[in-house]
Image (spheres, rainbow, N blue to C red):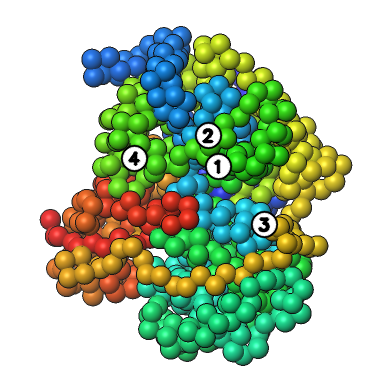
Amino acid sequence: GRTPEPARTRTTCGYCGVGCSLDVLTRDGGVVAVLPDHDGPVNRGHACVKGRFAHGFLRSPERLTHPLLRRDGRLEPVSWREALEHVARGLRAAVAEGGPDAVAAISSARATNEENYLLQKFMRVVIGTNNVDNCSRLCHAPSAAGLTATFGLSGGTDCFDDVERADCLLLVGANPAEAHPVVGARLLQRVLRGARLVVADPRAVGLARYADVHLRPRPGTNVALFHGLAHVLLAEGLIDEEFLRRRATGLPELTTLLAGYSPDRTAAITGVPADDVVAAARLFGQAEKPAIIYGLGVTEHLHGTDGVRTLANLAILRGAVGTGRGFGVNPLRGQNNVQGASDMGALPDLLPGYGKVTDPAAQARAERVWGTPVPRRPGMRIPEMFAAARAGELRALWVIGEDVCATDPDSAHVAQALETCPLVVCNELFLSETARRADVVLPVASWLEKEGTFVNFDRRFQRVRAALDPPGAAITEFAIIHALAAVLDADLGCSTPAEALAECGRLAPAFAGLSHERLDREGAVAWPCPDPDRPGEASLYRERFATPDGLAQLSAAPYLPPGEQPDDRYPLVLVTGRRWAHYNSGGMTRRTDNLLLDSVDRLDIHPADAARYGLRDGDPVAVESRHGQARLIVRTSDAMAPGQVFCAFHFPASGVNTLTSDRADTVTSCPEYKVTAVHLKAL
Ligand code: SF4
């Protein structure tokens, strides 16, 4: 007979934060093809290699299909009942011995909004602690803090579609050609149609070859570079005085500070030639509609929040935010739902919708909706959880969808924390580095096997739909959290993802106008969206900024040096980041049998440095830092600046995150991934 037509399910990509809308074609319980949605609000018929082809992991023989429980040092398959009762006993014991704050949970961009919402509710209502955090701590926490301090809300200021109108793009610390390929392609289209492009990145990232000016600051010197650009804007009168008078505050303090950042002084700190600083500032300053797009090269620093704030200064000085006359300031989120995980309140200090846990009004709102008191003391951030575990104060840790032993910095200490903690529970697709060290491993559904929503990098909610059933006994995070609550004799309410989003909307006004039914009808809706009958606010702050005084807050934070410094013993600076074919710790992409995908992690190095170490392409090399050692394969590249090396973190076996330090952004504890002093040894 004829082969039946495949079923078609429209969903949102579970890899990067672009949020491509995809049609997943399935037959006989397997994926036949993944096609980009031609009407996709962000992708408009495009998708990258990850979204289209990295689905082989779904039926990998390594996929976890049963709960596992550690007995006599070995993880053994058990029933759900046995696994959950073990977890429940462990949680009760942890609370009995150390109180609710002896328990913590780490949530994730891989979980839907509804799963993040349910997890934070579980921690606050069932356990009674604010010890819940998510992976944004490791990437864009400085964006949330910096953008909130500057403009009032934690997301990017505008809709990505506005980039079509921008006449100058300032792309900072991001490599969208590899990490956000669909965005990279749209930026390139805009440049080819006439927009000017300034790239600020130590590496010659993909788009740099199309740049009018490529600024290559030494890693860790962003704040000085942004001040240098602002200095030129002020000195040459390339500012919007009327906007600054009406809608911003802090100009006198900033003006005083900027006197110390002449192009020459900026050049001395950053290594960027003074003429390039001037040229870039003029391009940005003379543009009608300048746009700032940035990535983790701005945030993952000792002073990452200062980086976000001083970058935002440039948009404010130009009056290019909150007016429709410019594209504002927009972070490229690395992971699919890292914005949503924070929006839903999987944060130790913030409730869903960003009400502070210490704010009586936000507490009262949560208590009204949940019908129970909420904990008032801010909880631990992820690095504090690991420190507390090592100190014997944290007695139970639940890790959802994050391979913290592979992706968190100074991973030897993370592993130690997990080994010390009496109960570690890990929800996973595979036996990851973290799952290997857990006491209980719970098998979960992937992004292609569950219902809910994600929020992409420009604050758009989109539906996630199940194209397949999960294998074996694997179930969704949503079902696991409910099941564990039931074993603990608690009822979390909201029995479906749709009900969870509706409940979140009752608690958080910014999401009150959203529902699954509306998203099914409209496709994508941006938050804030307080009203079901009105569109979401794709571009923010047209009337006023959301700060207490309604004004954009210029930052006069001075440049401070990075925590890590090269010296004679560790003369090179390592920057870590992402590559085109892989996603995070590679759990899914490494298990996709596709010859297009890179199969080893490489160390990119300038040819002159390679020659100095006697290294050639393909040579194995040991990379040593003050914190650990990794083994990589050399790839010489002119894209690297001399004195700097680059690698990704997609292959946990190479041990890249044993190299990185536990130094972190002074405001948000986001790790200083972008600056690690290293030396090399040929193997
Ligand atoms: Fe789109 Fe990002 Fe998915 Fe690629 S990984 S298809 S760019 S959402």
Q: Quadrant of residue 576?
A: bottom left
Number of the label disc, if any, that sits on residue 234: none
Q: Given the image, on which type of amino acid does mark 2 rest?
A: Asn
Q: Given the image, on which type of amino acid does mark 1 rest?
A: Asp
Q: CA distance from mark 1 to mark 4?
A: 18 Å
Q: Given the image, on which type of amino acid does mark 3 rest?
A: Gly
Residue in view at x 74 percent, y 62 percent: 550
Q: Does residue 27 appear in the picture of this structure? A: no
Q: CA distance from mark 1 to mark 2?
A: 7 Å
- Quadrant placement of the C terminus: bottom left
| Residue 636, placed above or below residue 622 | below
Q: CA distance from mark 2 to mark 3?
A: 23 Å
If you read the primary sequence from the N terminus, does the residue marked by circle 2 or circle 4 appear first?
Answer: 2
Number of the label disc, if any, that sits on residue 349: 1
| Residue 100, placed above or below residue 649 | above
Q: Position of residue 541 (x, y in %)?
A: 75, 60
Q: CA distance from mark 1 to mark 3?
A: 16 Å
Label 2 sits on residue: 130
Q: Secondary structure at mark 3?
A: loop
Number of the label disc, if any, that sits on residue 152: 3
